[in-house]
Image: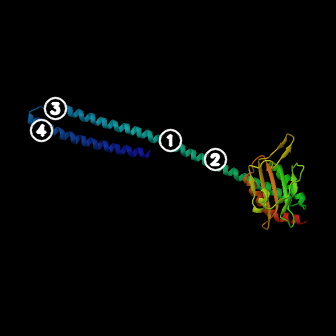
Amino acid sequence: MKGLKNYKLIAIIIIIMFIILEMFLFQEITNLISDINKLSNINNNYSGVITFFFINLILVIFLFAISLKILSLKLNKDVTKTEDYSKKETREEINDDLEEKNKTEKEVETEKELNSIFEELRKIKDINLYTEKFLINVAKKYEIVQGLFYLKISKSEEFEVCSKYAYFNEEEPKKIKIGEGLSGQVAKDKKAMNLSEVPENYIKVVSGTGESSPKYLLILPVINKEKTIGIVELASFVPFKENFVKQSVVLFEKNSEFISQLIKK
């Protein structure tokens, strides 16, 4: 709107200058016509000149009025667009803030739940019961359909299964060598692996409706003093949340010394 006011002021100044110029030209032309009439002895007749200047003036004023109207409409449209954009930005900012708040609340909730699971496990004095309880408790809260907990064989580069959850197979899970297969690679790299495309027939879940293969697989390393002492495989039909993966890694690191002591017993 400030631009429109400035334009109106400029337009008024131009019109006033134009009127002054018109009057000056009108005066000069009438003087010229008067001189010509005196020389030719013709009566003065300024009606045509006056009509011409009035029509010219009205036309200029009309054009300025049209220009102001067009500019006003354009500015109003721009202002509306700006206000709509501003409102949209505000809504997006509010939605982002709410999403960030909800995300933080979910992260806090996940951290509390996992903390409570590990705190409860610290009461256990047997490694077999510890690994079994971990799989059961995690499965209850996070839609885990199958789980395996491997532990490193003493003085060996292999891991063997210690506890199973919802594992139905005629054959026992094979031992894992460091660097071989997905879990072996996790043991070597000491980094969690969160897969959304599990290799075909890698995992099978048996239920009353038959066999099915979970799509999502999370493999967690249990690291103590920079050495992998355990591997956890968790399978699910729903994606693993990033905050769940992060908190699981942190809490396994935090409790790795306790797990290591249980293994030695």
Up the image or down, 232 lies above or below 86; here it is below
Packing grade of label 2 (10 A; few <14, some 14-19, many >=20) is few
Which image quarter: residue 36?
Answer: top left
**15 and 171: which is toward the camera:** 171
Label 3 sits on a secondary structure element that is loop
The residue under label 2 is 95
Q: CA distance from mark 3 to mark 2?
A: 77 Å
Instruction: Please say if the residues under marks 1 and 3 sit with CB atoms less than 8 Å apart.
Output: no
**Sequence-first tag of 3 and 2:** 3
The residue under label 3 is 45
Residue 49 image position (x, y, % from top left): 21, 34
Label 1 sits on a secondary structure element that is helix
Q: CA distance from mark 2 to mark 4?
A: 80 Å
Residue 38 image position (x, y, % from top left): 9, 36
**60 and 173: which is toward the camera:** 173
Q: Is residue 14 visible?
A: yes
Location of the N terminus (image quadrant): top left
**Sequence-first tag of 4 and 1:** 4
Instruction: Please say if the residues under marks 1 and 2 sit with CB atoms less than 8 Å apart.
Output: no
Residue 157 image position (x, y, % from top left): 83, 64
Location of the C terminus (image quadrant): bottom right
Q: Which mark is residue 169?
A: none
State the colouring used for the structure image. rainbow
The residue under label 4 is 35
Q: Which amino acid, mark 2?
A: Asn
Label 2 sits on a secondary structure element that is helix
**Sequence-first tag of 1 and 2:** 1
Choose mark 3 or mark 2, whichever is in front.
2
The residue under label 1 is 80
Which image quarter: residue 243?
Answer: bottom right
Q: Which amino acid, mark 1?
A: Thr
Q: Which amino acid, mark 3?
A: Asn
